[in-house]
Structures are given as structure tokens and as C-alpha cells.
Image: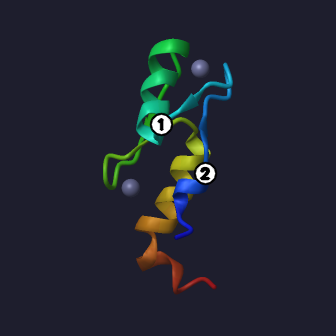
């Protein structure tokens, strides 16, 4: 099964491997005082704004997408 599990949850600040993306978020918030961004559509949390935007585009933009491509 190839899934998202292949993606490593490595902290880019201290190169520590975390068990899950949720743990990485918690780590980044507490160890490095990172500002976590939250998806307004479903409440999922992300470390980078670009990750949130990518997620929102993938998960929540079905309505808009069909028109402009
Ligand atoms: Zn770290
Ligand atoms: Zn979302």
C-alpha cells in the first residue's frame, strides 16, 4: 500500500522525526513557537500557509475548479 505514510514527518527546524503530522504540528508549536495555520473548511492544522492552501485547493475547491480550466 503506497499512501501518505511514505512521507516523513521531519521537523525542519531541528531535523527530528515525529511519528505523525499531528505530532509534528504539536512539536513545531511547542518546541519552536511556530504559528500553526488552520483550515477554515475542516479545522485541520498545518505548519505552512502553502500547505494549508494546497489542502484547501485539493479538498474544498471542487465547486470553483470546474469552471476555469
Ligand atoms: Zn523541531
Ligand atoms: Zn480542510
Residue 2 position in % (x across, y down): 56, 68
Badge 1 density bin: few <14, some 14–19, many ≥20, Cα 10 Å: few
Q: Secondary structure at mark 2?
A: loop
Q: Is 44 or 65 nearer to us in this picture?
A: 44
Q: Is residue 15 left or right of residue 60?
A: right
Q: Secondary structure at mark 1?
A: loop
Q: How many marks?
A: 2
Q: Which quarter of the image is occupied by the C terminus?
A: bottom right
Q: Is 2 or 14 nearer to us in this picture?
A: 2
Q: Identify the mark nearer the N-term, 2 or 1.
A: 2
Q: Is residue 34 left or right of residue 59?
A: right
Q: Is 13 or 40 nearer to us in this picture?
A: 13
- How far apart marks 2 and 1 lie (CA) works out to 11 Å
- At horizontal 37% and vertical 46% (from top left) the residue drawn is 44
Badge 2 density bin: few <14, some 14–19, many ≥20, Cα 10 Å: few
Question: Which residue of the protein is positioned furthest toward the left in this rendering?
Answer: 42
- At horizontal 53% and vertical 55% (from top left) the residue drawn is 5
Is ligand 1 closer than 8 angstroms to the Cβ of mark 1? no
Compared to residue 32, the image places residue 9 above or below, namely below
- At horizontal 41% and vertical 66% (from top left) the residue drawn is 60
Q: Contact (CB < 8 A) between labels 2 and 1?
A: no
Residue under pointer 1: 19
Residue 3 position in % (x across, y down): 53, 65
Q: Say the numbered circle drawn on residue 54.
A: none
Quadrant of picture, ligand 1:
top right
Q: How is the image coloured?
A: rainbow
Residue under pointer 2: 7
Amino acid at each position: 500500500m503506497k499512501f501518505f505514510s511514505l512521507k516523513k514527518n521531519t521537523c525542519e527546524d531541528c531535523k527530528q522525526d515525529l511519528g505523525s503530522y499531528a505530532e509534528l504540528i504539536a512539536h513545531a508549536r511547542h518546541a519552536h513557537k511556530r504559528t500553526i495555520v488552520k483550515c477554515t473548511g475542516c479545522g485541520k492544522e498545518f505548519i505552512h500557509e502553502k500547505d494549508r492552501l494546497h489542502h484547501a485547493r485539493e479538498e474544498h475547491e471542487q465547486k470553483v475548479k470546474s469552471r476555469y480550466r
